[in-house]
Image (cartoon, rainbow, N blue to C red):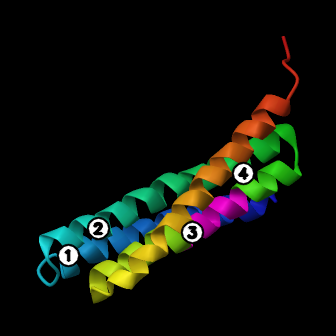
Amino acid sequence: MQRTFMTWGALLAMLGVAIGAFGAHLLKSIISEDYMQVYETGVHYQMIHALGLILIALVVGQWGESTRLRWAGWLLCSGIVLFSGSLYVLSITGVKVLGAITPLGGVCFIAGWIFLALEALSRRSET
């Protein structure tokens, strides 16, 4: 699980940089400023949650594997696909119905962070 989430986190962060550069260099002159902001929001959230996956991988290395950490990692992955992915497609195509998918990704993000918090709270304090 540690290797899986570290790999996904690193790949999704790399992809976030590439997608951000694509937007900055190629899309900026093609799509409206409003859609560019939507696109940049997708990149921003992808980068934050890719780093979250790397954090989860490091936590797994420290605390060991658990069901909560597994859920946390896969929910962040799903959130990136649903949230950021829907914003990318929406901003490029202008198909507004795709905006209905975005909140599902947001719920995945929130749930992933909750699972990480629950895992932290379940740990005994070592003093």
Q: Amino acid at mark 1?
A: His
Corner quadrant of residue 30:
bottom left
Is 93 placed left or right of 60 in the picture? left
How far across and down, in percent of the image, does residue 107 sit?
A: 58, 59
How far across and down, in percent of the image, does residue 65 sit?
A: 88, 50
- Mark toward the start of the polypeptide (3 vs 1): 3
Residue at the disc numbered 4: 57
Is 9 placed left or right of 73 in the picture? left
At x 33% / y 82%, what residue is drawn? 96
Residue at the disc numbered 3: 11
Nearer to us: label 1 or label 2: 2
- Mark toward the start of the polypeptide (1 vs 4): 1
How far across and down, in percent of the image, does residue 99 sit?
A: 40, 75
Corner quadrant of residue 72:
bottom right
Q: CA distance from mark 3 to mark 4?
A: 13 Å
Q: Amino acid at mark 3?
A: Leu
Nearer to us: label 3 or label 2: 2
